[in-house]
């Protein structure tokens, strides 16, 4: 068996099962829209390839990521399907199941979240489901791995999965139209099941219609659909053809649920509902979220993170640095190599690595929020605010993801249904404080605001959100005038995250930062150090006479009104376009700081408290990093919007920093 497609509604545990069945790991979160493109992995038993497709409620796509699933079924033609359904939301999930059974490929149904259904007092009979649907139904709990071995065994050989022989009767009018369309489709090569294509065409699935238009003249096909629609309306059987088809499926699904579900023991008020009365309360929801964020920052940057960073700083500046020095002396390394390794590599990369504990703690807490189910509630709480600004609450989920990295956050925006909301979110996400900016905040807040470090850093994060919302209002009014925003989001049940899932999710987020430390930051540190070591007069020159000083001096006059108009600041901002982490490593090299304490002392002499706030605001808002620019271009498919995102953010950074510094001076804060 070569390819097996994994499909299901959002937040049904598809990606958790994917991670269990394959040798790879993908991002998991307890909120809708986690998978935004197909994920591919090899089954652990070597039987084939498993493709995790975005969560969808129907094959009729509402958003860009949902279209991926329908497009895949059209073009790739998998040998088998695994459909994951939520046992606690069976009736809603079976709508997609019926459409997949009509696709005609051998199918296995994974009856997931049986533990959640049991906790709610819902009893599901898998044997009844299996008999009514005509396919294998395997109970499982994907997040713990329970039942996954049975799924893996069934996928081991293609003959283990019986062929699907599923057919609903949609009434004589629709069935005649289906037969006529099937006749027209016979001359088109490469199509999957013709009946399935015909039904999707009658439902006006835009992906199917475009697919057929690219391959044939669809005039006759569309005429058949129009005739069928007129007959239905003439007989007053349905308002529209898609509604009629859906009603037939819904009646069938309800009859199955009546047989397969026992809801006599259902509990009226479960834990999720009780918590939601508090956490999503119109008056309490926002204050609770803000209080949570404050505790998050205090924990990350003061209570737990700071002591761990101090220990790591002592290790790098002590044993590692002295050990490298001793080794280089022993092997007789030249002065150039000695300076490159100790000052360039260890000093540059080490200056960023010391903040790894705080970054991982931040990722751990964000992973907990995602997997617990609170993330979706945050978007609901923020919806009223964001709606006034021109977006809806669903866009707030990518904003939160942007605290880790802007690149996956922009990709997560694919799950937003409306093109206008998706574009706005993509353009505004670079204003979110990603982990790359965090070392700068940590450094400057530790120097100038040691007693209020968490509050200062939280202010920087909040500042990014505030400016994103203000610009959203402006962009909505002038760039996307006549496009409405609709908010629909599923609230998953609360659950205690699994330790294994939590640790893996944290590692997957954090390893990107470590990977940058070993690649971009390392390369950037070496280049910056060489520029600081060499000058027009040769090598080993004074720092003020180096190429780096000359380079920074070109930018410095533009930065003078912002409060940091020296060549050192200018030299850090330009390479920061490649990766914001390089800013701190560049400072370490420029100031020859042996450890974090030494760098802080140098910063205290170069900047004032007011200038430090201006500098942090500039780092927050100025041009997205190179990787973010690349993904903006990919997602918008437009150089115009990509250049616009670079231009507006740079202009915004300059104006805001100018207002902060010059306004502060007028108020006597200089």
Image: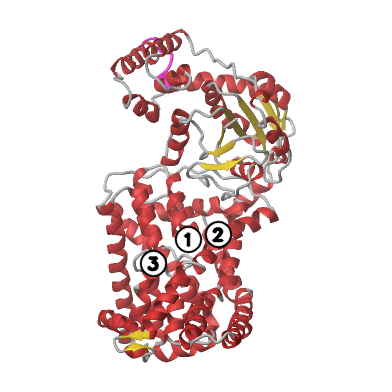
x and y percent of residue 69 in the render? 48, 35
Q: Earlier in the sequence, mark 3 or mark 2?
A: 2
Residues at marks 1 and 2 touching, judged by CB atoms closer than 8 Å: yes
Q: Nearer the viewer, residue 649 or 539?
A: 539
Q: Which mark is residue 585?
A: none
Point out residue 213 in the picture as x, y percentages from the top left corner.
32, 25
Residue under the point 26% across and 48% down: 481
Whichever of labels 1 and 2 marks the residue nearer the N terminus, that label is 1
Residue 19's place in the image compared with 588, above or below, is above
| 238 falls in the magenta region | yes
User: Which disc, if any, is residue 578?
Assistant: 3
Residue span colored magenta: 234-242
Give left or right: position of 504 versus 516: right
Q: Which residue is mark 1?
A: 405
Distance from the alpha carbon under mark 1 to that under mark 2:
8 Å
Q: Position of residue 84 (x, y in %)?
A: 61, 34
Question: Residue at position x 29%, y 20% from top?
Answer: 217
- Looking at marks 3 and 1 on the same chain, the residue that comes earlier in the sequence is marked by 1
Quote the CA–CA distance across marks 3 and 1: 14 Å
Instruction: Kindly report the distance in space between the C-alpha atoms of the residues bearing marks 3 and 2.
Output: 19 Å
Q: Is residue 576 magenta?
A: no
In the figure, 59 relative to 670: above or below?
above
Q: Position of residue 569 (x, y in %)?
A: 36, 81
Instruction: Tell me if mark 1 has few (under 14), some (14-19) or many (20+) residues whose alpha carbon lies within 10 angstroms of its own.
Output: many
3 vs 1, front mark = 3
Q: Which residue is mark 2?
A: 509
Dot 2, how many residues are within 10 Å of its Cα: few (below 14), some (14-19), or many (20+)?
Answer: many
Q: Quadrant of residue 616?
A: bottom left
Q: Main secondary structure of the magenta part?
A: loop
User: Quadrant where the N terminus lies?
Assistant: top right
Q: Quadrant of the C terminus?
A: bottom left
Q: Nearer the viewer, residue 565 or 149?
A: 149
């Amino acid at each position: 068996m070569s390819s097996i497609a994994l499909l299901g509604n959002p937040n049904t545990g598809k990606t958790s099962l994917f991670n269990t069945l394959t040798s790879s790991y993908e991002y998991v979160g307890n909120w809708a829209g986690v998978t935004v493109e197909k994920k591919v992995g090899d089954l652990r038993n070597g039987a084939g390839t498993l493709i995790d497709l975005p969560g969808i409620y129907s094959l009729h796509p509402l958003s860009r990521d949902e279209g991926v699933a329908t497009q895949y079924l059209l073009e790739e033609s998998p040998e088998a399907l695994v459909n994951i359904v939520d046992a606690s939301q069976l009736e809603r999930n079976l709508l997609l199941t019926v459409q997949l059974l009509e696709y005609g490929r051998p199918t296995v149904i994974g009856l997931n979240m049986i533990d959640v259904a049991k906790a709610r007092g819902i009893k599901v009979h898998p044997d009844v489901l299996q008999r009514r649907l005509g396919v294998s139904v395997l109970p499982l709990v994907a997040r713990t791995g329970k039942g996954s071995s049975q799924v893996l065994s069934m996928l081991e050989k293609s003959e283990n999965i019986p062929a699907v022989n599923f057919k609903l009767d949609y009434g004589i009018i629709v069935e005649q139209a289906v037969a006529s369309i099937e006749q027209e489709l016979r001359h088109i090569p490469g199509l999957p099941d013709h009946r399935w294509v015909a039904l999707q065409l009658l439902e006006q699935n835009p992906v199917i219609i475009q697919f057929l238009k690219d391959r044939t003249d669809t005039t006759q096909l569309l005429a058949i659909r129009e005739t069928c629609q007129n007959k239905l309306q003439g007989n007053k059987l349905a308002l529209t053809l898609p509604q009629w088809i859906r009603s037939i499926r819904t009646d069938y699904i309800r009859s199955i649920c009546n047989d397969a579900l026992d809801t006599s023991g259902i509990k009226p008020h479960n834990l999720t509902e009780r918590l939601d009365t508090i956490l999503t309360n119109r008056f309490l929801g926002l204050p609770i979220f803000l209080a949570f964020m404050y505790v998050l920052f205090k924990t990350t940057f003061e209570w737990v993170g700071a002591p761990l960073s101090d220990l790591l700083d002592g290790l790098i500046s002590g044993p590692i640095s002295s050990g490298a020095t001793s080794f280089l002396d022993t092997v007789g390394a030249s002065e150039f190599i000695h300076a490159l390794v100790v000052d360039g590599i260890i000093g540059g990369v080490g200056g960023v690595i010391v903040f790894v504990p705080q970054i991982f703690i931040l990722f751990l807490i964000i992973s907990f929020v995602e997997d617990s189910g609170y993330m979706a509630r945050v978007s609901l709480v923020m919806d009223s605010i964001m709606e006034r600004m021109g977006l809806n609450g669903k866009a707030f989920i990518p904003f939160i993801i942007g605290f880790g990295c802007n690149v996956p956050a922009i990709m997560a925006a694919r799950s937003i249904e409306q093109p206008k909301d998706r574009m706005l979110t993509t353009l505004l996400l670079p204003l979110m404080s990603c982990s790359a900016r965090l070392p700068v905040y940590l450094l400057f807040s530790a120097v100038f605001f040691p007693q209020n470090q968490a509050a200062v850093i939280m202010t920087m994060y909040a500042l990014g959100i505030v400016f994103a919302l203000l610009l959203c209002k402006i962009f909505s009014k002038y760039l996307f005038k006549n496009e409405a925003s609709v908010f629909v989001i599923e609230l998953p049940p609360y659950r205690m995250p699994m330790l294994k899932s939590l640790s893996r999710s944290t590692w997957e987020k954090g390893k990107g930062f470590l990977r940058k430390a070993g690649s971009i930051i390392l390369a950037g540190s070496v280049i910056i150090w060489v520029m600081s070591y060499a000058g027009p007069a040769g090598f080993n020159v004074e720092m003020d006479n180096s190429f780096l000083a000359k380079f920074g001096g070109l930018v410095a006059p533009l930065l003078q009104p912002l409060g940091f108009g020296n060549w050192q600041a200018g030299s850090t901002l330009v390479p920061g376009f490649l990766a914001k982490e390089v800013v701190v490593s560049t400072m370490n090299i420029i100031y020859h700081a042996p450890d974090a304490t030494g760098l802080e002392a140098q910063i205290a002499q170069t900047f004032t408290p007011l200038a430090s706030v201006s500098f942090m605001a500039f780092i927050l808002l100025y041009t997205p990093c190179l990787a973010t620019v690349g993904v903006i271009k990919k997602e918008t498919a437009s150089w115009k919007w990509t250049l616009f995102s670079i231009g507006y953010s740079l202009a915004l950074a300059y104006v805001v920093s100018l207002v902060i510094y010059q306004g502060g001076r007028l108020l006597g804060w200089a």
